Image (tube, rainbow, N blue to C red):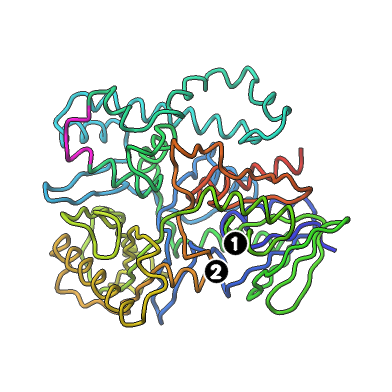
Amino acid sequence: MYDFIVIGSGYGGLAIASLLAKEGYRVLILESHIAIAGCASFLKRKDFLFDVGATTFSGVRSNQPLGILFNNLNIKSKLQKVDPGLIIKNINGNIIRHAGKEAWIEEASRVFNSSNQKKFWEKIFKIDSTAWEFSRNNYKLPPQTFGDYMSAVKPSNLKAIGLLPAFFQNVQHAIEKYNVAGNRNFLKFLDEQLLITTQNTRFEAPFLTSAMGLAYPSETYYPYGGMYKPADLIKNRFLEFGGEILFKQTVTDIKQSNDGYKITTDKGKAYLSKSVVSNIPIWNMAKITHGKIRQYFSRQADYFDSAWGAFVLNFAIETNVDLPTTYYQIHTDKQIPYCNALSFFVTFSMKDDIERAPKGWKTITISTHTDVDNWLNISKDEYAKRKSAATEFILQQFDKSFPELKDSAKMYLLTATPETFEFFTNRHKGFVGGIPHSIKKSILKMPPNQTPFKNLYMVGDTVFPGQGTPAVIQGALNVFKRITD
C-alpha cells in the first residue's frame, strides 16, 4: 500500500511526487510513456535532441513557482536568461521584446507609434507582480469550502483587491481604456501573443491572466539540454527521496475503496494507495473512473469541451550564424494551412548547448495552434496531404524570415500533429496547452486541485491555475500545502 500514487510524470506530477517523497511519504509514479515530462519531453535522433512541444522556461525567480520548487528540492538547473526574451518578425520588420521593462516600453511606443503604450504596459507589469504575490500566498484557490473563502479575506490580500476588475474584463476593454486600440499591427501582435500564453484572443481572454502572459518574455529562460532537463533533475531528486517510478504503465481504471484507491494499468497490474494525485487531463479522467467520480469529471469535461492542438516541426541545420535570441514568433500574412493561427513560434538551440546538437549545428522547434478536428478521423492520404501543406507553408515562411539560414540543409525533419500527441502522450484528442482562459468560462470555474472525493487530487494544465510550466508547478505547490496543512 502506497501513501500516494501519482498518475503521469509531467512537470506537475514530478513536482508533487518529489515534494511528498521528501516528506517521507511512500510515493509511486505511473507513467504511460517510456520517458518523463509529458508535453515537455524530447525526441532524439543520433546526436540531436528535439523538444516535442513546450520550449520556453519562465517563473524561476525565487518568489515564483519554479524558483520555490527548485529551492525546496535543492536543485540547480542550468538556465540562461534570454534577452531579448522574444523577437517578433512580421511584414513591417522586427519587434524586439526586450527583457528590461523600460527598454520594452520604449520599443512598444516606437513600433506602435503611441505614447499611450507606456501606461498600458506599466499596468501589465503591475498586475503581473501583484498576481504572482497573491498566488504565492493563497493556495486554497479556487475556494471550495467556507474555510477556503475565509482564508481569502485575510488582511494581506487587501492589496490584491485592485486585481478584481482585470479578472472580469477582457483585454479589448483594457486596450480601449488605455487608448491603444487604434493600431492594427498592435492588435495582431496582442492576439498572436495571447494565443501562445492564454490560448485565446483579446476579446475572450481575461485581462488578469493575459497581463501575466504578456509580461512573461521579461523572464524567459533557456534550459540547457532541453525542456526535459530540469524535469530530469526533479525526477532524480524524487528517486533520491525513495520514490518509485514505473514506465509503460497506462492507467486504465481507478476505483475508490474504504481504505483508498485501486489503480489498474494496461499491463494488468494493480496498485493500492491511500491517496491519488492525477496529472492527466480531465477528459481522460472521465474515461477511467466510476460512479460519482466519473460523473464529476464528465461534467467538467463537458463544460470545458474544447482545447487547442499543436502542429510541430523539428529539424537540425548546420550553421555558425549568431542569432540575437533563441526565441522568435513569425507572423504570417495568411492562415497556415489546416492550422488556426497567423503565426508560429520558433526555438533555436544555443550554439554552446552540445547536449541538443553537435558544435556547429542547431536544432529547431517550430509550433503553432491547430484545431484537432483538422487531423482526426480522416484518411491516411488526406492526413498526409494536410501535413505536407502545413509543413511546406511553414518552411517557406521560415526561409523568408531567416534568409541567412536559407541555404542550410534541414536534417531529420520531423512533424507532429494532434494525432501524434494523442498516440505518444495519451491526451484526449491530442489536446495540448491546457484549457483556454476565458471571461465566459472563468478560471475560478476550472476544476480545483482538491476534488470532492477523499484523498483524490489533481495537478496539470486542465485544472487550476491552468496552462504553462509555472502554472502546473503552482498547482503542485498548492496540493502539497493542502496535504501538509
| Residue 181 part of the magenta segment | yes
Task: Give residue 271's mark.
Answer: none
Label 1, on which residue? Answer: 284
Q: Residue at x 73, y 28 (%)?
A: 147
In the rendered image, residue 356, in percent from the top left (x then y), is placed at 40, 69
Q: Is residue 175 above or below residue 414?
A: above
Q: Is residue 113 above or below residue 93?
A: above
Q: Residues within 10 Å of mark 1 (few under 14, many from 20)?
A: some
Q: Nearer the viewer, mark 1 or mark 2?
A: 1
Q: Residue at x 54, y 63 (%)?
A: 37
Magenta segment boundaries in residue numbering: 180-187
**Residue 191 in which image quadrant:** top left
Label 2, on which residue? Answer: 426
Judge from the rendering whether residue 170 lies leftward or rightward of residue 267; answer left or right: left
Judge from the rendering whether residue 471 lies leftward or rightward of residue 294; answer left or right: left
Closest to the observer, 173 or 408: 173
Q: Are marks 1 and 2 in contact (CB under 8 Å)?
A: yes
Give the amino acid at mark 2.
Asn
Give the amino acid at mark 1.
Asn
In the rendered image, residue 251, in percent from the top left (x then y), is placed at 67, 69
